[in-house]
Amino acid sequence: MKHVSILVPAGEAVVGSIEGPHKVLTQVNELLQSMGQGPAFEVQLVGLTEYKTFNRGLFTLHADRTIDQEFQTDLILIPAPHGDLEQAVAQNQALIAWIRRQHAGGAEVASLCLGAFLLAATGLVDGRQCATHWLGAHDFRRMYPQVELVDERIITDERGIYSSGGAYSYLNLVLYLVEKYVGREMAVCCAKVFQIDIGRDSQSPFVMFRGLKEHNDAPIKKAQEFIEANFQNRISVDELAAMAFLSRRNFERRFKKATFNSVAEYIQRVKIEAAKMSLESSRDNVNEVMYSVGYTDTKAFRALFKKLTGVSPLAYREKYSRKVAA
């Protein structure tokens, strides 16, 4: 039986990312018991204090253990903090140190959604891949440049260090761990009980691209604004570099440093984001949408759209259109 520690962090947190995994893992034990088998998990809440309130006192959680007690766990689940993420990291230094000690003793570690910020603060994913909510991607890259953020992924598994994408996609990681520790049959059973899409592996369809502008490079910010205002037109790197009064090489270097995208990637993402908005809100066919954002090659447009969103333009419209017929 594996001992699972679901952390109760200092500061504010998304309570669902604590209660949700607790519910799924205890349900596994109940299902096993109904089959005449022993439990797979001992699930406990572990915090800095015995009691912790969240959401202005609306929720109170009782920790089964506190980190000052001597015990070794097998798996640590880090829930999503809520609010200022740098402050959350500062408030949880004691938990971060405890995670490092437990990992050194053999524990595996998994972050849920924005819990990736606390995981990255441990140093355990330096040079490794990590996922988080796409809304936190810019801040994550700024705070942890030594970590390879894969913000399109739902699940990462880096030799016993796991992470999940945003919001309720943490349940996909919990099912992944159930499958690893208990088996595929139980994971599928839980997917049916909780109605979770067990096959989902990308959060790309949910991403809304927002160019990072929280930097101090004024010429690059001006270039970003130009791209976003003129995405329907053909825009060249040389044109943008000339507008910024920079050499092409220097412009490309500074653009990548400021935005975490190459110039070509940024232009593509802006165009595809505009195409997504059109597919959601208009009745234009796919080719009309393609022309409206400045593409003329149908095959190339569809390939790029699927690369960035994980689905075809038609599939995207069918799922997210606001003009679905009654």
Image (spheres, rainbow, N blue to C red):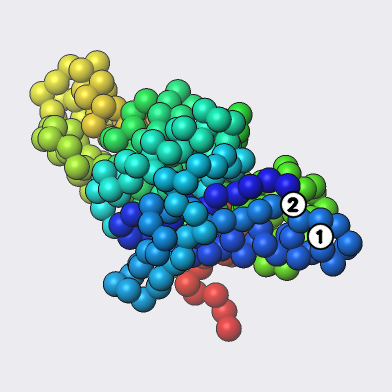
Gap in Å between the C-alphas at discs 1 and 2? 8 Å
For residue 228, side relative to residue 294 (left or right): left
Residue 8 or residue 297, whichever sits in front: 8
Which quadrant does the C terminus fall into?
A: bottom right
Q: Residue at x 84, y 67 (%)?
A: 34
Residue 262 badge: none
Q: Residue 219: image x %, image y %?
A: 13, 32
* Circles 1, 2 touching at the beta carbon (< 8 Å): yes
**Amino acid at pointer 1:** Leu
Residue at the far right: name it: 36
Say few, some or many: other residues with alpha carbon within 10 Å of mark 2 (under 14 / 14 to 19 / 20 or more).
some
- Is residue 232 visible to us here? no
For residue 41, side relative to residue 166 (left or right): right
Q: Residue at x 60, y 49 (%)?
A: 4
Q: Quadrant of residue 261?
A: top left
Q: Residue at x 54, y 42 (%)?
A: 71
Residue 53 or residue 278, whichever sits in front: 53
Q: Quadrant of residue 289?
A: bottom left
Q: Which residue in the structure is indicated by mark 2?
A: 40
- Is 127 placed above or below 308 here? above
Residue 32 badge: 1
Q: Residue 56: image x %, image y %?
A: 29, 72
Q: Residue 262: image x %, image y %?
A: 34, 28
Residue 314 or residue 196, whichever sits in front: 196
- Is residue 219 visible to us here? yes
Q: Quadrant of residue 244?
A: top left
Q: Residue at x 35, y 67 (%)?
A: 54
Q: Residue 212: image x %, image y %?
A: 26, 42
For residue 195, side relative to residue 142 (left or right): right
